[in-house]
Amino acid sequence: MTTNFKPLTLCLCLQAIFLIISIPTTHSRTTFLAKDEKLSLIQNTCKKTPNYNICLQSLKANSASSVSDVTGLAQIMVKVMKAKANDGLNKIHQLQKLGNGARKALNSCGDKYRAILVADIPQAIEALEKGDPKFAEDGANDAANEATYCENEFNGKSPLTKQNNAMHDVSAVTAAMVRQLL
């Protein structure tokens, strides 16, 4: 009678081994597909913006993008906007300390970058949190415009061109991304 249990025991052991081996493989395959799907979401979202490369580079630099939907991606871009605005304001402060001759233009640009930081970015953050993408788009567009206005203050001789272009481009990408939520 013990010989009848050996094939049954062997069969159950083999099934258990197969089950244990297949679980991690199935889980890994699902995780891999999810990562591909998220990368595809990022790429497809960025293709609908005015600057695919800036969009993709900005999102790939933030690990949270791999688990985000379009709203989450837009929130990441708003954080990038904030970083660019702070970079611009820091550059303005550096130039002001040097006593650059364009004092009036620098002061005006400082006001514009402060407006981005205290009005436009908080507006975009709050609007995305509340599910009101139109106001988020307005905040991003306003930030892009402020950077353009700052650049124009210098009549073609801006020491802030790099910062203004970065602020404008990231804001335009953010606005286009948010527009996808409308």
Image: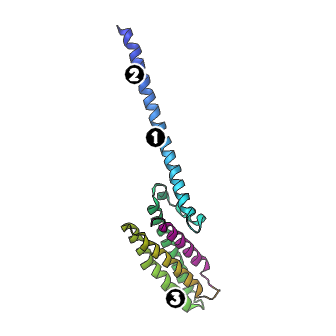
Residue displayed at 47% across by 69% down? 78
Q: Which residues are magenta?
A: 158-182
Where does residue 109 sit, x and y in percent of width and height? Answer: 53, 85
Report crowding for label 1: few under 14, some 14 to 19, many 20 or more residues within 10 A (C-alpha): few
Q: Which residue in the structure is indicated by mark 3?
A: 108
Up the image or down, 122 lies above or below 13; here it is below
Q: Are marks 3 and 1 in contact (CB under 8 Å)?
A: no
> For the point 51% across and 50% down, which residue is it?
35
Asked if labels 3 and 2 touch by Cβ distance under 8 angstroms, the answer is no
Camera-side residue of 170 and 45: 45
Residue 12 numbered mark, or none: 2
Q: Nearer the viewer, residue 12 or 176?
A: 176
Determine whether the residue tagged by mark 1 lies in a helix, strand or loop. Answer: helix
Residue type pointed to by label 1: His
Residue at mark 2 to residue at mark 3: CA–CA distance? 78 Å
Q: Which residue is mark 1?
A: 27
- Crowding at dot 2, Cα within 10 Å, few <14 / some 14-19 / many 20+, comes out as few
One can see residue 70 in this view: yes
- Front residue of 142/94: it is 142
